[in-house]
Image (cartoon, rainbow, N blue to C red):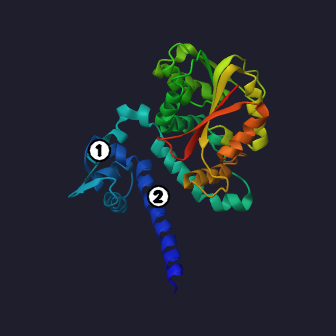
């Protein structure tokens, strides 16, 4: 066997082992084992009783989790690592939300890839506007919100030198980016725009962030509904990847008419190079969109310039992201 063949074989084995590790740890998350350990250190027998599982089989998962550094094993008991306690603190649920459960959904979606590719029938998920339960849709938006808090704060910091009185966030979801911008500009008013079934969660989060009194909520179709005009800033955060190039050009051209003279459009999304060879995180995201039936794609900075060109907006600056190295922020001015 050649050295190259051996290396490739080992890479395949490593991939399978990483998949096995991921499935084992996320199974413990799904069972609520980490939440139970937040309360106190417990034996495999006690955890099995609480999760209604077999203690012998469960202990194998616990031992692997300990070996991988996700928990500590002391004699017959398992415990959270001291530095990880905040991740499972129920009092911190607003910050961490459904992030771990969201990771499990990502894994199960990828495991269905072979069937989806063969049949051409994508999964119905909340992120693609699929016919899912209200609980699933709410969980998905909550997951995105908590996963985006630090990134949204960084995006808001870019606007510190802008004079903003009216801000619109299109495809806003839970409103994470809009709330951060409004907190950075206490005199500004916000326009939240997304599907009607997302308004409830967005209003709850806006209330918790102390900005709800400065926000108008518009639920509907942002391709068809009138959105007003006179905005100093329009935010498109993780939105253009949902649509093909033609749809994005149409949307951006329409939104440009809603900007006041000198107003800006901020497009934040996942980075991909022109040859579609990286970054890896963005390539994985592109596969995820394929699996859930999304018509969009991950776009390079040059692609975004092409999207904006028909609208006649001037490219002002492109910014890299400390909190999301696989993303970019591009600002255009009217």
Residue found at the far bottom of this picture: 1
Residue 209 versus residue 55: which sits nearer the camera?
Answer: 209
Q: Is residue 130 visible?
A: no
Residue 184 versus residue 52: which sits nearer the camera?
Answer: 184
Residue at 52% x, 34% y is 145
Quadrant assignment, res 201: top right
Q: Are marks 1 and 2 in contact (CB under 8 Å)?
A: no
Q: Secondary structure at mark 1?
A: helix
Residue 121 placement, left or right of 11:
right
Residue 35 placement, left or right of 4:
left
Task: Read off the residue under disc 2.
Answer: 23
Tell me residue 70's x, y (percent). Answer: 34, 53
Residue found at the far left of this picture: 75
Residue 116 placement, left or right of 27:
right
Quarter in which the C terminus is drawn: top right
Instruction: Please tell me whether residue 55 is drawn above or below residue 193 in the rendered image.
Output: below
Q: Secondary structure at mark 2?
A: helix
On residue 123, the disc is none
Question: Disc 1 or disc 2, which is closer to the eye?
Answer: 1
Residue 140 placement, left or right of 230:
left
| Label 1 – label 2 distance at C-alpha | 23 Å
Task: Read off the residue under disc 1.
Answer: 83
Tell me residue 47's x, y (percent). Answer: 32, 51
Instruction: Please tell me whether residue 292 is drawn above or below residue 216 in the rendered image.
Output: below
Residue at 26% x, 45% y is 82
Residue at 37% x, 58% y is 54
Instruction: Please tell me whether residue 253 is drawn above or below residue 281 in the rendered image.
Output: above
Q: Is residue 62 visible?
A: yes
Residue 217 versus residue 115: which sits nearer the camera?
Answer: 217
Q: Earlier in the sequence, mark 1 or mark 2?
A: 2
């Amino acid at each position: 066997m050649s050295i190259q063949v051996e290396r490739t074989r080992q890479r395949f084995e490593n991939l399978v082992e990483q998949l096995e590790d991921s499935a084992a740890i996320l199974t413990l998350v799904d069972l609520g084992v980490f939440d139970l350990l937040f309360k106190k250190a417990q034996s495999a027998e006690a955890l099995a009783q609480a999760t209604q599982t077999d203690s012998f089989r469960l202990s194998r998962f616990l031992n692997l989790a300990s070996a991988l550094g996700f928990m500590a094993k002391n004699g017959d008991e398992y415990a959270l690592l001291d530095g990880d306690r905040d991740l499972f603190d129920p009092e911190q649920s607003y910050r961490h939300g459904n992030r771990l459960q969201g990771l499990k959904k990502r894994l199960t979606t990828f495991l269905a890839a072979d069937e989806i590719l063969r049949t051409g029938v994508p999964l119905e998920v909340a992120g693609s506007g699929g016919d899912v339960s209200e609980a699933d849709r709410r969980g998905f938006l909550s997951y995105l919100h908590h996963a985006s808090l630090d990134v949204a704060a960084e995006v808001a910091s870019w606007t510190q030198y802008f004079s903003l009185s009216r801000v619109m966030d299109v495809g806003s979801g839970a409103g994470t980016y809009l709330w951060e911008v409004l907190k950075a500009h206490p005199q500004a008013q916000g326009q939240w725009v997304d599907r009607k079934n997302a308004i409830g969660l967005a209003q709850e989060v806006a209330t918790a962030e102390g900005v709800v009194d400065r926000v108008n909520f518009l639920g509907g179709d942002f391709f068809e509904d009138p959105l007003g005009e006179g905005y100093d800033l329009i935010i498109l955060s993780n939105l253009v990847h949902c649509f093909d190039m033609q749809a994005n050009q149409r949307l951006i051209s329409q939104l440009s008419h809603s900007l006041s003279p000198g107003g800006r459009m901020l497009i934040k999304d996942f980075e991909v190079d022109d040859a579609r060879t990286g970054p890896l995180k963005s390539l994985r995201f592109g596969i995820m969109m394929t699996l859930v039936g999304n018509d969009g794609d991950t776009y390079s900075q040059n692609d975004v310039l092409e999207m904006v060109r028909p609208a006649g907006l001037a490219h002002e600056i492109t910014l890299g992201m400390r909190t999301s190295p696989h993303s970019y922020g591009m600002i255009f001015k009217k």
